[in-house]
Image (cartoon, grey):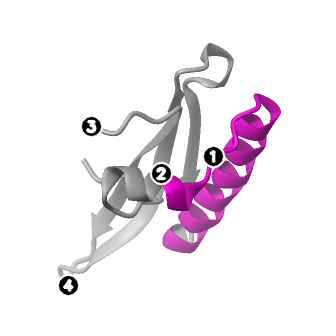
Amino acid sequence: MFPVPFALYADFESFITPSGEHVSSGFCCLRVSKFPQYDHRIHTYSGDNVVQEFLKYVTQEQTEIDSILLSRGCDFDRDSASSLSGQKLPLVEPH
């Protein structure tokens, strides 16, 4: 296991049309952190363009998390961290 100061957990919701098609209808994303003041931030979205909205949200989270880490004196280099674990760091960790 590769310890990190932040993680995002996401869950997508969908409905099934009469023709059997799964249509995304929303998502919920939970931010957890080893820093208590930044832990357990929950974001929910329901509406159109779910995947695009999710990617927009995760990009905003990445920017905010980078800012938090820099303000705490953590110079987090994703390329260096990737080489330590032997794999690319995912933007979103599947469970």
Q: Alpha carbon of mark 4 to alpha carbon of mark 2: how far?
A: 45 Å
The answer to whether 15 is drawn above or below residue 21 in the figure is above
Mark 2 and mark 1: span between their CA atoms? 8 Å
What residue is rendered at 70% in x and 37% in y?
A: 69
User: In the displayed structure, does residue 86 sit left or right of residue 42?
Assistant: left
- The amino acid type of the residue labelled 4 equals Ser
Q: Residues within 10 Å of mark 2 (few under 14, many from 20)?
A: some
Residue beneath disc 3: 1
User: Could you tell me if the residues under marks 1 and 3 are in contact, i.e. CB atoms within 8 Å?
Assistant: no
User: At label 2, which amino acid type do we have?
Assistant: Ala
Magenta-drawn stretch contains 52:
yes
Q: Is residue 19 visible?
A: yes
- Alpha-carbon neighbours of circle 4 within 10 Å: few (<14), some, or many (≥20)? few
Of the pair 95 and 26, the residue shown nearer to us: 95
Q: Are marks 2 and 1 in contact (CB under 8 Å)?
A: yes
Percent coordinates x, y for residue 36 in the rendering: 61, 15
Q: CA gap, disc 4 to disc 3?
A: 42 Å
Element class at badge 3: loop
First along the sequence among labels 1 and 4: 4
Secondary element under disc 2, as helix, strand or loop, is helix
- Which quarter of the rendered picture does the N terminus lie within? top left
* Residue that badge 1 annotates: 76
Q: In the rendered structure, which disc, 2 or 3, sits on the residue that comes first in sequence? A: 3
Q: Which mark is residue 19?
A: 4
Residue found farthest to the bottom? 19
> What distance separates the C-alpha of mark 1 from that of mark 4?
47 Å
